[in-house]
Image (cartoon, grey):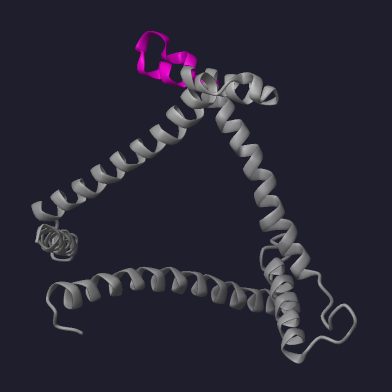
Amino acid sequence: MESGLMHHVALWLAAFLTLGIFSFLYRDNTWYKVCEAIFVGISAGYWFVAYFWDNLYTKFWVGVWVTPMADRPDDWYVLYVGAALGILMLLRLVPKVGWISRWPLAFIVGATAGLYLVTYFASNVMLQIEDTVRPIFGAENDAPIYEIIGNIVVAVGTFTGLIYFFFSKEHRGAFGRAAKVGIFFLMITFGASFGYTVMSRMSLLIGRMDFLFSDWLKLIK
């Protein structure tokens, strides 16, 4: 009985919040602001608890103080240096010595930038170059027809796209026509990316509408 009551309360609360967010389509109103504040507050509280147990408790308290250092002597620099940087970061809460938090912040920003530089260079640059310079007819000239057509499209699109961004020469004649082909490929790429974004948002909308008409109003079975 109690679980059934909680289910109905959660169902009506979810419908109330969903309709409150949808009410922004009419105009900015108090109902929408309340739902937005609830969403932001719950998100902030959830991530605070998650980071507390994952970082402060598991990595700092258990990793540094509870687990004996003799069990993992090779991790001393990770535990103690990381703990020291974390404590220095918390000094931002103290106005007089808040400037000290700039040092761990600079370390985090630099380390993260260096890590992402290597990661994105390998995934976004090297892999794309590899896909661009692959043999059109396959490594052993035995590629199926659809793969050959795809390789030709990739080669032509890459080459003409680079021509469009080459501004040292005026886009006239054959050079200009190749640049126009590059614009065509760029527009297809941007359109596909935008369409993918719209479809992902539409899937969220469809999910909410299905919830309202199926789970809440029971109009769809």
70 or 122: which is nearer to us?
Answer: 70
Residue drawn at x 39%, y 32% is: 52
Q: Position of residue 199 (x, y in %)?
A: 40, 74
170 or 183: which is nearer to us?
Answer: 183
Which residue, as the protein is rendered here, is positioned at the far front?
Answer: 1
Residue 29 visible in the shown view: no
Which residue, as the protein is rendered here, is positioned at the far top?
Answer: 96
Q: Position of residue 90 (x, y in %)?
A: 42, 20
Q: Give the vertical position of 167 relative to 65 (above or below).
A: below
51 or 170: which is nearer to us?
Answer: 51
Q: Give the vertical position of 21 relative to 46 (above or below).
A: below
Q: Position of residue 33 (x, y in %)?
A: 15, 50
Residue 27: image quadrant is bottom left
Q: The magenta stretch spans which residues?
A: 88-103
Magenta stretch encompasses residue 86: no
Residue 36 visible in the shown view: yes
Location of the C terminus by quadrant is bottom left
Residue 166: image quadrant is bottom right
Predominant secondary structure, magenta span: helix
Residue drawn at x 30%, y 45% is: 43
Q: Position of residue 91 (x, y in %)?
A: 42, 16
Q: Does 218 sit left or right of 154 as displayed?
A: left
Residue drawn at x 74%, y 71% is: 159
Which residue, as the protein is rendered here, is positioned at the far bottom?
Answer: 145
Q: Give the vertical position of 33 relative to 161 (above or below).
A: above
